[in-house]
Image (cartoon, rainbow, N blue to C red):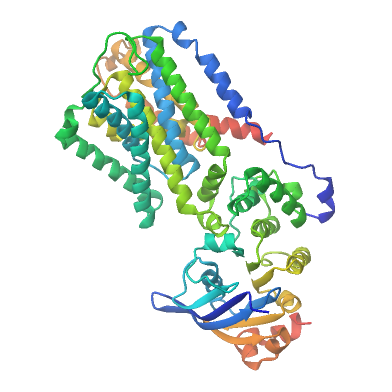
Amino acid sequence: MSPVVTVEHIGKSFKGLRALHDVSFTVEPGEVLGIIGPNGAGKTTLFNCMAGMFPPSTGTVHYESQDVTGWSDARLARAGMVRTFQLMRPFGSMTVLENVAVAAAARGESEKEAEEEGWEILQRVGLAQYATRTSKDLPTAGLKRLELARALALHPRVLLLDEVLAGLVPTERQPVIDLLLSIRDEGATLLFVEHVMAAVMALSDRVLVLNQGETLAFGTPEEVVANPEVIEAYLGDEVTDADAH
Amino acid sequence: MSETLVQTVPSPLRKRRFFDSNIIALIVLVVLAFPLPLLLDQGQEAVAIRVLIFAMLGMSWNIMSGFGGMFSFGHAAYFGIGGYSSSILLVNFGISPWIGMVVGMGVAALYGVIVGWLCFRYKLRGTYFALATFAFAEMLRIIVQSADVVNSSVGYNVPLIQGSSWWLMQFPAGSPNYFWLGLGLMAACLLVTILFVRSKAGRFTVAIREDETAASSLGVPVLRYKLTTIALSGAIGAVAGVFYTQYYLFIDPELGFGAYRSIEAILIPVVGGIGTIWGPIVGSVLLAPLNDITAAILRNPPPFLDFLEGRTGLDVMLYAILIIVVILFLPKGVFGTIKEKVTKR
């Protein structure tokens, strides 16, 4: 099977500040790729380059055997490569349902179809009872789900998830993890940046570790946590003791 | 947030029908307003017509800046382009103001798209965007003021005709037709606003206002919809300018493109309710009569205000006070505040 996403030698500098340097990896269809690294390692920059927020300074991104380097975020989203944001970005004055309908409509559905689809997705992600509330009134956990719900409305084949679990208390995490797995089971490929190590270990087929903008390690979760460089650079003994199991 | 609740939640999906509450309110408004010119005297009718002009100007600003969140400080440009387009065509070529209106709408939309594109190209936002719209409108005013080909600072008098003509949009002074013409145009602009807001384009526009980055990452072509919104706003502003010129039979650079016009365009929705369909209507009903009330006070002040006799500028002072009061106590405008109170129940 050919990879659904191929990232080759991607790099990004901001006015001379090197945020990302020569990162390459591939993702197979249906795979779950965890991306970890200390703060400032370039995780979000990588997502931003892949999702078209800004073009990379060097390197290429291929999606479904098309060169999508330099595509706009809107075009990529309509093509099925969708990202969510670490800090939730709801359309505050709109209802929760309207938020999701925007994404469905952007994919080309009529207003009526978009609302019907939005309603189905809200039921699926557990936001049904909030459908007619304005989205700015949602609690954090609800906003996290809304980010996911809107992304789902675009029928994503690749989802770039930026810390979907951050800010959730442990009991709120499991339903989101279950939801992510069900999305994966429907054939979507997931890339996720995450700090919650237990989730990274449980969900990922492979893990990419970034440090100071460069690839530090890339392999199965077991390989990565056993890698001495990774342990030294980032994970310390926190993972080996407390979170990995 | 538990999944078990899901099945018990009633569907929020409603039937989409053309005659929703806004359209019905529009019809009621037109029916109620229709007999007004038969009930009002000539002076009161003039005020009523100014309400209609203000409403269109306010609706125009409200689409771009209220729903679209792109703060315009140069809406006089659209108004002036409308008034000048129809006057130039009518005075020089005898072309009907109806055609002039269509041309004006097109030119205003095109002007808006060009200015908007330039601003977004150079990433102007917020205050800087507003200042740029102001600068462009002032530029137009200065160009028109100094260009002999458009009568420079003299402006245009609409040539008078004998009797009435719907085709030439001209009626004898005090004719109820002026009100009905304005009412029809205003209703058309309001209908377009309602249809826009509930369309896909309207929903995208609000989404872009709320969070441009999020809208873009969800596949919304942001630039296209921003420019569409500006074009629609500009076209409605031009309609207001054409009707103004045909009613007062006169336009000059200051009346068309002056900064005061841009301020009016902002104040109407601010007082009524920014980003609401009915805000500009409420705002224009409150603001349009102010000039006449202040003029009456200045002409013949009550005893305790007799120091005001013969002075000018009271309307501007009242505007200022009104704005301060609205911003302090009704930051969402009169209609916006009422709407919030009602929907919170």
**On the image, which quarter does residue B343 sit in?**
top right
Q: Position of residue A33 (x, y in %)?
A: 67, 77
**Residue extending furthest bottom?**
A228
As drawn, B306 above or below A226: above
Q: Quadrant of the N terminus of chain A?
A: bottom right
Give the vertical position of B138 relative to A54 (above or below). above
Percent of width and height locating residue A68: 52, 70
Q: Nearer the viewer, residue A163 or B207?
A: B207
- Looking at the image, which residue is at 40% across and 12% down? B177
Q: Is residue B303 visible?
A: yes
**Residue ID at (39%, 15%):** B178
Total labels: the figure holds 0
Coordinates of residue A208 in the picture (x, y in percent): 63, 81
Which of A99/A19 is in front?
A: A99
Visible residue check, residue B333: no
**Quarter of the rendering occupied by the C terminus of chain A:** bottom right
Left or right relative to A112: residue B151: left
Q: Residue at x 65, y 72 (%)?
A: A192
> Left of A201 or right of it: where is A218?
left
Q: Position of residue B292 (x, y in %)?
A: 35, 16
Q: Residue at the spot x=24%, y=29% of the render?
A: B88
